[in-house]
Image: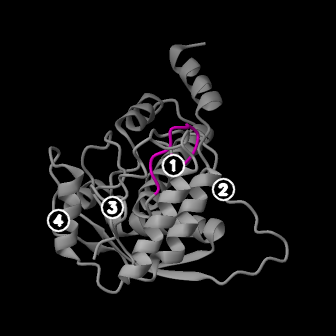
Amino acid sequence: MTPGERYVQNFRTRNTAPNVRAPDAPVGAIRPELVFHVRVYADQTYRDGTPAWAFAVRRRFDTFATFVRQRFGARLEADAPMAWPYAVSRAEKLSETAAALGRQDRGDGVDWVIGFVGQDPDAWPHMASDERASKFIVVRPGVSGSDGTSANRVRNIVDAEVDKVLIARARHRELFFLAHAWAQSLGVPDERDEGFLGSRHYDLQAVEFSEASARLIALGLQYRGDWTPASRDAWATALRGEIQAHPTLYPADAAEEIPAWPK
């Protein structure tokens, strides 16, 4: 067996990415569907590095919206992705990019503004703000440099099966990063445990949020549509209590870091 053939064999057995799944709804359960509105942008660096960028962004958003609807009973609606006349620099902090996105779109009339940027693909693309609770989300590319290296190494010996594995892995990363950032926008801290969509580090086998983080997300969705100060205070209190109830799952200072919902 040649080194190339051995690499493909190992790649097949160790890097098969499962599809992110959602549990079935309880039989007979009826719950009202929550509807949230989103605007989606792609900056110049993303558009330059992504063929058919509008299609790629729409596919990525629709996959994520399907997961949210199945898992949490919430429908995310967005118009066609828009070009963002901005080019993020490699040295730029995520908080700076989020601030630039806020200047582009104040978020009026929507619950989230998502900006896809295309620099520094090996950086962790989580929530791009000092505030965990925010309607502005910046997401880095879903394919890392290591994924690109893997694709190049098998390019000359690739077959249909390996091609599918590479695509599945890229799709999984895309959804993982966006789901993680979205959860943080609802106040969910990074989890200490590995193997979940809320984990601090990417895990190829992560297909679900932990039950604790799923409860935090559901809690955030309940308050998301009400921007009154009283509602935001109630949300922060409830969220803090849930986090404190799981001291081993989240960082010790997670509850104290909850900011006031933006006024």
Relative horizontal placement of residue 54, taking residue 4 as reference (left or right): left
Relative horizontal placement of residue 229, taking residue 201 as reference (left or right): left
As helix, strand or loop, the secondary structure at mark 1 comes to loop
- Residue 9 drawn above or below residue 190: above
Q: Which is more toward the observer, 240 or 128? A: 240
Q: Position of residue 132 (x, y in %)?
A: 36, 58
Q: Earlier in the sequence, mark 1 or mark 3?
A: 1
Q: Which residues are magenta?
A: 188-198
Q: Residues within 10 Å of mark 4 (few under 14, many from 20)?
A: some
Q: Amino acid at mark 1?
A: Gly
The secondary structure that most of the magenta stretch takes on is loop
- Report the disc number at residue 259: 3
- Give yes or no for residue 111 being in the magenta stretch: no
- Residue 242 drawn above or below residue 7: below
The alpha-carbon separation of the residues under discs 4 and 1 comes to 26 Å
Q: Residues within 10 Å of mark 2 (few under 14, many from 20)?
A: few
As helix, strand or loop, the secondary structure at mark 2 comes to loop
As helix, strand or loop, the secondary structure at mark 4 comes to helix
Residue located at (44% from left, 61% from top)? 182
Task: State which quadrant residue 42 falls in.
Answer: bottom left
- Residue 11 drawn above or below residue 214: above
Q: Which quarter of the rendered picture does the N terminus lie within?
A: top right
Residue bearing mark 2: 21
Residue bearing mark 4: 100
- Give yes or no for residue 192 being in the magenta stretch: yes
